[in-house]
Image (cartoon, grey):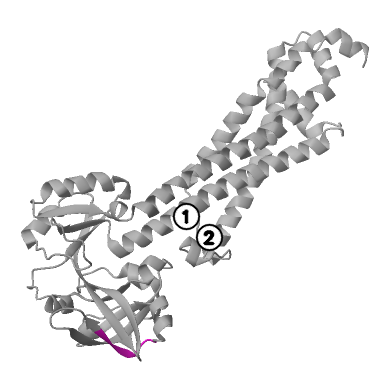
Amino acid sequence: MNFPYFLAKRITLSGQRTFSKLIVRVTIGALTLAIMAIIMAVAILNGFKKEITEKQRGFFGDIILLKNDTNDSYVNSPISLSKEQIANLEKNPNIVDIYPFATKAGIMNVKGEVEGVLLKGIDPDYDQQFLSKTILEGDTINFAAEDAENQLLISSLTANRLNLKVGESFIMYFIQEPVRKRKFTVKGIFSTNSEELDKVYVIGSLSLIRRLNNLTESEVGGYEVRVKDFNQLGVTTEQMNDALDNSMYATNVVMQMPDIFNWLNMLDMNDNIIFVLMVVVAVINMISALLISILERSSMIGLLKALGMQNKRIRTVFLYNSLYLIGYGLLLGNIFAILIYFFQTKTAFFKLDPSVYYVSFVPMDISWITVLWLNVALVGIALITLFIPSMLISRISPIKTIQFK
């Protein structure tokens, strides 16, 4: 029989001491709050990074293929890939799809109000799944309709500024020689909650931009490439550059938006700080509870020593007792954290200012493996740290403790 475990169980479940009850409750509460804070911090940070990253990926693609020249205007120099070249690029196991696009600067004129925008043209094969998630009113572009070239998706920011609604029409001017104008109908109103995107872009038909820019049916402004594993983005970008000729080059969304992704990477430091602070709080409370428990049961320790029990086995008794408190606190903390997690992911109850945080609610995302490792790490750190104060047991004299019992 494991006598230290048996004794620790009796002390924990059947002990009649009352002096340390308050400390034990405070310790369990501190552990509960610590693991809750750690899990919530990791879930919120992961969710926040995932939401922001998916917005940029959804709007621009993961990898962008462009003309290799010095052009830095809004209108990209035309490029062309044959079906064979596209099929060859899609042989890369990390490539999902390749979509053509083109851009054209324009000026919207609505009842005397003007707004400069960048028209992004897409074709019928373009995956509008991301766009459909951002639609607030109306629908995505219907390329099967006869008026597909006249349909336009505008942001809620632009719609509010120009007082436009779904189904209404307006004129857009394109600055070129000669100046050209087109009549568009608002097919849908979207919101990415990113002012940089919502203020600049509108979505329309690629075929219209081809005609405005005098492009052939095979020429486009660029290609968006979707990847399976975003963690392999850098490697896949290099592989794409190796596969392309010198007339084109591959860049990616991280290179195009360095400020946003550097900011997201810096947020990892917040997670580390919260983890360290919460572990320190939990360990301090555990050490206090352990020392009080040892001092409160010094007479029992002296009696066990007098009966020949080794210091190592006595320390094991109190470490088992501490492990029970840790487990109880972690159980409560995990239950509360998981309940909050599912509540927020299902209801989006806790809101944020989208103009500041790019999202309208507190996003959460975490895996069960991460939760498990966080718990294991906290338990391991706590037990290793508690081994030092448990050495106090070796300094307790059985003669003195029994004498003054």
Locate residue 303, reporting x and y percent. Answer: 83, 13
Residue farthest front in this picture: 177
Tell me the amino acid under the disc marked 2.
Val
> Which quadrant is the N terminus positioned in?
top right
Q: Nearer the viewer, residue 374 or 116?
A: 116
Locate residue 63, reporting x and y percent. Answer: 24, 55
Q: Quadrant of residue 328?
A: top right
Q: Quadrant of residue 226?
A: bottom left
Under circle 1, the secondary element is: helix
Residue farthest right in this picture: 404
Image height check: is 90 above or below 208? Answer: above
Q: Residue at x 19, y 73 (%)?
A: 123
Q: Earlier in the sequence, mark 1 or mark 2?
A: 1
Image height check: is 353 above or below 295? Answer: below
The answer, for residue 145, to whether it is visible in the render is: no
Q: What crowding class fits label 1: few (fewer than 14 Cα within 10 Å), some (14-19), or many (20 or more)?
A: some
The disc at residue 47 is 1
Q: For the residues labelled 1 and 2, say whether their Cβ atoms are less than 8 Å apart.
A: yes
Q: Is residue 166 magenta?
A: yes
Q: Residue at x 17, y 46 (%)?
A: 239
Q: Nearer the viewer, residue 142 or 175?
A: 175
Q: Residue at x 11, y 48 (%)?
A: 243
Q: Which residue is mark 2?
A: 362
Image height check: is 284 above or below 131? Answer: above
Under circle 2, the secondary element is: loop
Locate residue 229, reporting x and y percent. Answer: 30, 49
Q: Is residue 267 magenta?
A: no
Q: Nearer the viewer, residue 341 or 193?
A: 193
Q: Is residue 280 left or right of residue 70?
A: right
Tell me the amino acid under the disc marked 1.
Gly
Q: Is residue 283 left or right of residue 230?
A: right
Q: Which residues are magenta?
A: 165-172
